[in-house]
Image (cartoon, rainbow, N blue to C red):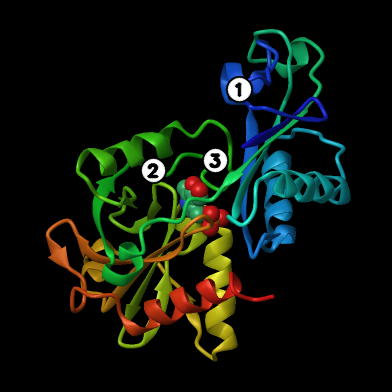
């Protein structure tokens, strides 16, 4: 594992951040997670574009160019011992200031941090047998659901709910009874051959893997419908799957007490898993 702090690659156990960094004090920062396939950062341009969108949503000015960010990412990846794949996380905080909410109360100099570690693949059984998920009713999605802020407590609490029940994930349901996303994943369902995913405006992150699934299916002449998905409809799906950068596509075979489809990963999900795996084999 290697960190990038203050413009230098360092051992993360020894790297320090300023106590007054607003990212630490108030969660006033944003981040991005990407991964390699075959030791190359996958679709880095999509991640950097979302990184900039997140920074601009919080009005954090930062001057680092995409070329410089890519250079740091490539160097960080190369520092992790081969042959494992690598997870890269990059953060921008508003930087150290006065310990006041008002960023205008003192100078703030945005700071870039990064961390690179080996990607530990999840057990193969999650792809072969699928996983169980629960549901979590929430109030209205919080205002910044589209932004990857470092203030990730709602996601952390949702994930803890899943872990306490020994579930892979919880599926969040908004105040209207419609499905949004997982604690840290997006969600798709298949019904009579039609692939459907909740609309961004229902309260979910514009996941990069969600985009990759749409792209992959469209290259196979299959369209994905973005639609509001009531929880009842999800429960009657033939297939349900989750998507996240570090795990790819994961079939869900049970939600609360309901078996999804046949209780086994379905053909569309299995095909997507194969396509994602093939990226790791490409030379
Ligand atoms: C709330 C939330 N939704 C969806 C995702 C999946 O996004 P991506 O595919 O870009 O990893 C994440 C990833 O961490 C997340 O935190």
Label 2 CA crowd tier, 10 Å (few <14, some 14–19, many 20+): few
In the displayed structure, does residue 25 sit left or right of residue 98? left
Mark 2 vs mark 3: in front: 3
Say what secondary structure mark 3 lies in: loop
Position above or below: 234 against 29: below
x and y percentages locating residue 105 in the rendered image? 75, 10
Label 1 CA crowd tier, 10 Å (few <14, some 14–19, many 20+): few
| C-alpha gap between disc 1 and disc 2 | 38 Å
Q: Which residue is mark 1?
A: 13
Mark 1 vs mark 2: in front: 1
Q: Which residue is mark 2?
A: 140
Residue at image coords 31%, 48%: 175
In which quadrant of the rendered view does residue 98 lie? top right
Say what secondary structure mark 1 lies in: loop
x and y percentages locating residue 38 in the rendered image? 64, 65
Label 3 CA crowd tier, 10 Å (few <14, some 14–19, many 20+): some
């Amino acid at each position: 594992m290697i960190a990038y702090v203050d413009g230098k690659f360092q051992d993360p156990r020894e790297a320090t951040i300023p106590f007054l960094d607003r990212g630490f004090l108030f969660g006033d920062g944003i981040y991005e997670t990407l991964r390699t396939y075959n030791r190359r950062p996958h679709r880095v341009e999509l991640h950097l574009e979302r990184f900039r969108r997140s920074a601009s949503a919080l009005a954090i000015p930062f001057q680092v160019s995409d070329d410089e960010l890519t250079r740091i990412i490539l160097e960080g990846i190369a520092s992790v011992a081969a042959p494992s794949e690598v997870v890269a996380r990059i953060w921008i905080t508003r930087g150290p200031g006065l310990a006041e909410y008002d960023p205008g109360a003192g100078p703030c100099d945005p700071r870039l941090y990064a961390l690179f570690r080996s990607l530990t693949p999840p057990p193969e059984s999650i792809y072969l047998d699928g996983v169980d998920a629960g549901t979590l009713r929430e109030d209205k999605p919080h205002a910044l659901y589209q932004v990857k802020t470092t203030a990730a407590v709602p996601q952390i609490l949702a994930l803890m709910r899943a872990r306490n029940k020994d579930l892979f994930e919880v599926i969040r349901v908004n105040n209207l009874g419609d499905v949004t996303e997982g604690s840290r994943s997006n969600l798709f369902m298949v019904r009579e051959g039609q692939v459907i995913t909740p609309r961004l405006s229902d309260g979910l992150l514009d996941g990069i893997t969600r985009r990759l699934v749409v792209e992959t299916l469209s290259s196979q002449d299959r369209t994905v419908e973005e639609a509001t998905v009531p929880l009842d409809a999800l429960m009657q799906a033939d297939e349900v799957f989750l998507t996240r950068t570090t795990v790819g596509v994961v079939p869900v075979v049970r939600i609360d007490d309901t078996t999804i489809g046949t209780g086994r990963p379905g053909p569309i999900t299995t095909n997507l898993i194969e396509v994602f795996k093939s990226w790791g084999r490409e030379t």
